[in-house]
Amino acid sequence: MNEGYLPIGRFARLCRLSVKQLRHYDELGLLAPAHVDPDSGYRYYRPDQARAALLIGLLRSLDVPLPSIGRVLSDGTDALGGVRDRMEADLARRERNFAALERILSHGLPRSEVTVVREPARRVATVRDTASQERIGAVTSANVARLMAAVNALGAGGGPEGTAGSTGATGATGATGGPTGTPIGLFPLDLTREIAVTIAVETSADVPGTTPDVLPGGLYASVTHVGPYDQISLTTHALFAWLGERGHTPDGPLHEVYVSDPRTTSPDRLVTHLMIKLEDPE
């Protein structure tokens, strides 16, 4: 054996890795030994492989996934941009979850007051999109802005372009009966990997770039959420708990009526009405 090669045990100590880790990285194609003894199967490494081995250890200590480390070894650190973005999204999710847990610890499990109201059918303009659960908030906000921009482009005296709920609410649904109505988010009851997001606003006009639709009338269970949008799930829990306790069957998507203007209202004071249609008794 060439004296320039290091046996796996010595190389592992040099690189602050275990022999088991080095074998695993070899199996994954991340760091192949410079030589494998054909008789014993023993692995040997060159000293100049230490830099790559140490880099793998460093990136693993930063929770970089092994497939991404492979791309770094072959393509350079530019491959870390996607890893950073995923970590940032995960951090934001954890911060939202932490805030929700803090709210539960401070105020207990949500038990918001639910009322039953009868709503008329409403003609609406809609925009539709899909989103992963991690991006549902961003996609909802973008589509509220898109819809309100289309409505305001009619020149009907609506609020500032892209405003969510800038005109306030009238009645249980927050609709005003015209093209300046409050935006309503419609979300399916079954949450899948890709969630259908529909934003609607009541209007009697045809709005370019949108799809006309009708929100059905009937009995709705309604509850009001006050607080950040990313904590709406707490009030949604209270709504569905109320439905379950009384044996009601939901009929149709969950409505989120965005009453407040988030540009001028602090997150803790945002008002959102949550509504869900009840199955009509036969």
Image (cartoon, helix red, strand yellow):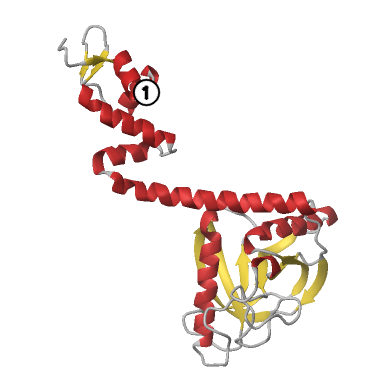
Inspect this view and state whether residue 282 appears. no
Label 1 Cα crowd, 10 Å radius (few <14 / some 14-19 / many 20+): few
Residue name at image x 65 percent, y 73 percent: 265
Residue name at image x 70 percent, y 51 percent: 102
Where residue 219 appears, as percent x and y from the top left, is 78, 71
Where residue 128 appears, as percent x and y from the top left, is 52, 70
Question: Seen in the image, is 193 located left or right of residue 73?
Answer: right
Where residue 22 appears, as percent x and y from the top left, is 34, 22
Tell me the kind of residue under disc 1: Arg
Q: Which residue is mark 1?
A: 16
Q: Secondary structure at mark 1?
A: loop
Question: Seen in the image, is 14 located left or right of residue 228?
Answer: left
Counting labels gives 1
Inspect this view and state whether residue 270 appears. yes
Where residue 163 appears, as percent x and y from the top left, is 57, 79
* Residue at the outermost front position: 14
* Residue at the outermost bottom position: 156
Residue name at image x 71 percent, y 63 percent: 251
* Residue at the outermost top position: 39
Viewer-side residue, 96 vs 259 = 96
Question: Seen in the image, is 82 located left or right of residue 88?
Answer: left
Quadrant placement of the N terminus: top left
Viewer-side residue, 267 vs 214 = 267
Viewer-side residue, 275 vs 164 = 164
- 197 lies above or below 211: above
Question: Seen in the image, is 241 located left or right of residue 10?
Answer: right
* Residue at the outermost left position: 2
Quadrant placement of the C terminus: bottom right
Residue name at image x 55 percent, y 55 percent: 133
- 210 lies above or below 241: below
